[in-house]
Image (tube, grey):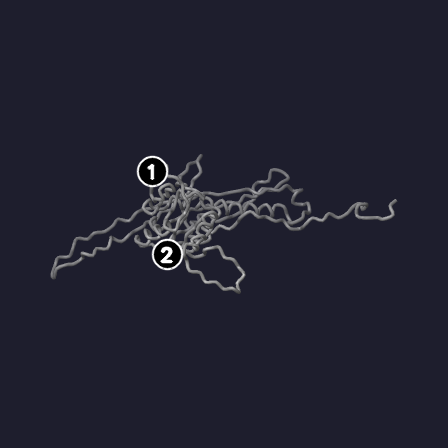
Amino acid sequence: MTANFSTYDQVGKVEDVSDIITNISPTKTPFQTMIGTEPIHNTLHQWQEDSLIAANAANAAVEGAVAPTAVMNPTVLRTNNTQILTKTAQATGSADAVKTYGRDKELAYQLGLRSAELKRDLEAVLVGQVQAAVAGSSGVARQMASALAMIDATTTYTVNGTGGALNSTASSPTAGAIREDIITTVAQTLYIDGAEPDTIMVTPIDALTVAGFQANGRTRFVDNGQKNIVNVVDVYESPYGKLKVVMNRFLSSNAALVFEASMWKRLVLRNWFRKTLAITGDSTDVQILGEFSLKHKNFKASGLITNLNG
């Protein structure tokens, strides 16, 4: 017996469990969102790239001259392989029958998680590393060439943090920070080649460095009625055009990309789909699978900055 019956004396209280599951894992995949898609019909995709002959200021003919001999650049054949990405979601019959907080059916919830993970995996394949194409075999998985492996050497710049130089001839140049002059040099090269870059994609660490560019003697307009403090650069305007600054948490930690989004396509052989696997017991297994590749319409249309210390 107790004179003052309180919650400490109660038996059989209903649990107070929030019916919301919070997941802070990142799911935004900016590169594949920006570039759009194109259907393909083979595991090996091929395309050709072309370029104009350099402008000739000495192009002048005498009156009545014989027509000059035709001069043409041969096209360049490019290829890339498809890559299969897959995961499996699984739940036992009991797990799917039990009433749970934060979700209706366990299998449906697990399918949602695995689907989000696959989207992140594809973004990591596209821009998270330098990956060469692999044709594969019956025992070796096919792999697509990543974006970092599909940019011409003449538009790839290696930072040397010690000397501050680009395209260092040192065998192991010291990693350095991204700098404004590096970005303008890449933009200049692309402009001269005829490209029209519209995006610079950077890691979260390098995004902070780019935000600091506005402190380098820029003119600022201040509204005293505005209480927000802004430390971000959304658009960087260079002499060679405006570059939208896009942060990508899946981008390789030592790289930055300068590119025109329309010059890239995510190739789709088999878009994401699900299939229930053969039931061998009291559980359900569902495989999620997709097969994709990547096309860079012209390897000189984008720039790559490497050896960053971000």
Where residue 268 appears, x then y in whole percent?
A: 44, 49
Amino acid type, residue under disc 2 in the picture: Ser
Q: Which residue is mark 1?
A: 170
Number of callouts: 2
Where residue 170 appears, x then y in whole percent?
A: 33, 38
Q: Which mark is residue 238?
A: 2
Characterize the local packing of mark 1: few (<14), some (14-19) or many (20 or more) Cα atoms within 10 angstroms: few
Amino acid type, residue under disc 1 in the picture: Ala
Characterize the local packing of mark 2: few (<14), some (14-19) or many (20 or more) Cα atoms within 10 angstroms: few
Seen as rendered, the residue at the extreme left is 64
Whether pointer 2 and pointer 1 mark residues with C-beta atoms closer than 8 Å, the reply is no
Q: Is residue 15 left or right of residue 118?
A: right
Which numbered disc, 2 or 1, marks the residue that appears first in the sequence? Answer: 1
Question: Which element type, helix, strand or loop, lies under badge 2?
Answer: strand
Seen as rendered, the residue at the extreme top is 139
Classify the position of the N terminus by image quarter. top right
Classify the position of the C terminus by image quarter. top left
Question: Which element type, helix, strand or loop, lies under badge 1?
Answer: loop
Residue visible at 39% across and 57% down in the picture: 237
Mark 2 vs mark 1, CA separation in Å: 29 Å
Closer-to-camera residue (139/179): 179
Where residue 167 appears, x then y in whole percent?
A: 33, 43
Where residue 168 appears, x then y in whole percent?
A: 33, 41
The image quadrant of residue 110 is top right
Closer-to-camera residue (40/248): 248
Closer-to-camera residue (158/228): 228
Q: Which mark is residue 99?
A: none
